[in-house]
Amino acid sequence: MPQLVDSSRPNSATVPFSASILKPRTSSLASVTSGNWSGPWTFPISSPPATAQRANPRSPNSPMCPRTSLISSEAPFSNRFIIYERALKALPGSYKLWHAYLRGRLEIVRNLPVTHPKYDTLNNTFERALVTMHKMPRIWIMYLQTLTEQKLITRTRRTFDRALCALPVTQHDRIWEPYLVFVSQKGIPIETSLRVYRRYLKYDPSHIEDFIEFLLNSSKTKHRLWLELCDLLTTHAPEVSGLNVDAIIRGGIRRFTDEVGRLWTSLADYYIRRSLFEKARDIFEEGMTTVVTVRDFSVIFDAYSQFEESVIAHKMESLDLSDEEEEDIQEEAIEEDEDIRLDVDLCKSKHKFERKIFKGFWLHDDKDKDLRLARLEHLMNRRPELANSVLLRQNPHNVEQWHRRVKIFEGSPTKEILTYTEAVRTVDPMKAVGKPHTLWVAFAKLYENHKDIANARVIFDKAVQVNYKTGSSG
């Protein structure tokens, strides 16, 4: 039996083993056939067929080998596109191929508008990649980032949900981070953001403070929206003169029962910007006499007082300028020898004529500084009365507030009598907060202190006829 020699051994004199057809040497064929062969077996080398090289994707010469077949990155992408598609068709599960291919497509659309058709092609390519790369978080993140840039809200949200379903929970933190950035952008519906944040808190409850901060920064109440609308209307008062701004803002005032001070001041500011100062004063007065909270009253009163102060300051400046003009006119009148009515310049003549003729008349006098100061002083003196009226609008049956109102008018018997009369007519003993009989007693003592005993008896006679609550007088 002839002995075979392993050609793969390094000390063998033969060449390495080949996968080609094994053939013994022709000269020794007869000896082998006759059984007299005693030498080692040797085989010739033959290269593999060219078809085998093309069929083997691991071959360096194979067009499907990514290491040798992809052309230079400086080449046009249209040329690389064909090679990428051929390689991915042969190796659809290659992460490196898909990653390089997608990065190349992202570079193409980097400087294009998001409405360009190439973005649709890019999105379709990502969808193809996720067929086999759905367990690769980096591919998901690349896709989600480009969808976020395209402002495709619904598609982006659904793709985020798909990524969370496809990836294991240990990799969800890589998806949640861009997900929260996405829902925090402007233009995302608040309901969508709230739902996503609630789901995130189930995944990581330690970020509850981030959720609270998001709510504080993003949520807007109807009252806040009305304030923004009022600010917009008042800031652009000349441009919106065609709108019924008064009706719009009053609609917001009727909608809310409190925190309407800003709305009243916005309406007054609208008329101030249109130089309708008397109308603005009417709005301030109406607001102060209709609000039901001290906070709203303070907002309106402060705005009203600041408005009056600014008007006085502006008037003082204008008076200084007018005084200088009068001095100039007097100097010109002394120097001029001709009659003012014979002035050639008719415009200047008319103006000077009016200044001379109407000077000193009250209707033409614009020096109403004292009147404006008196108006501001009157406003400040009315503050306690107006503030008390706000509290009585909250509860007109508060006996203590009526007593405080009478003290405001101390020293004015007429106003005290009118206040007591209004108090005993308004306060319902069954709903009163405090002791309603004290109003009648104080009312009668007021007449008694002014030596009017007859009216004091009349007040007591009416007081005993009132139906009080049982035990309220004790």
Image (cartoon, grey):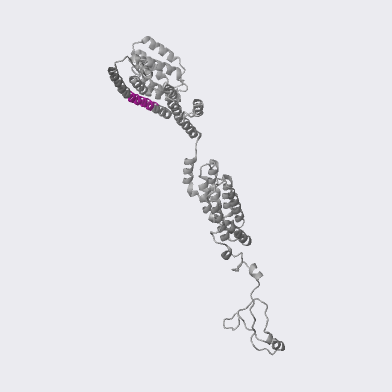
Q: Which one is nearer the viewer's eye here, 326 or 443?
A: 326
Find the magenta span and give its range.
304-318
In the image, taking residue 126 as reference, residue 37 lies left or right, namely right
Q: Which one is nearer the viewer's eye here, 467 or 264?
A: 264
* Residue at the spot 66% in from the left edge and 69% down from the top edge: 51
Residue 348: x and y in percent read 36, 19
The C terminus - image quarter: top left
Q: Which one is nearer the viewer's eye here, 107 or 91?
A: 107
**Res 361 visible:** no
In the image, taking residue 446 as reference, residue 45 lies left or right, namely right
Residue 1: x and y in percent read 68, 87
Does the magenta segment cover residue 309? yes
Residue 319: x and y in percent read 32, 23
Residue 253: x and y in percent read 49, 27
Dominant secondary structure (helix, strand or loop) of the stretch shown in magenta: helix
Circle count: 0
* Residue at the spot 43% in from the left edge and 13% down from the top edge: 462
Q: Is residue 358 above or below residue 262?
A: above
Does the magenta segment cover residue 282? no
**Res 302 visible:** yes
Q: Is residue 433 above or below residue 107?
A: above
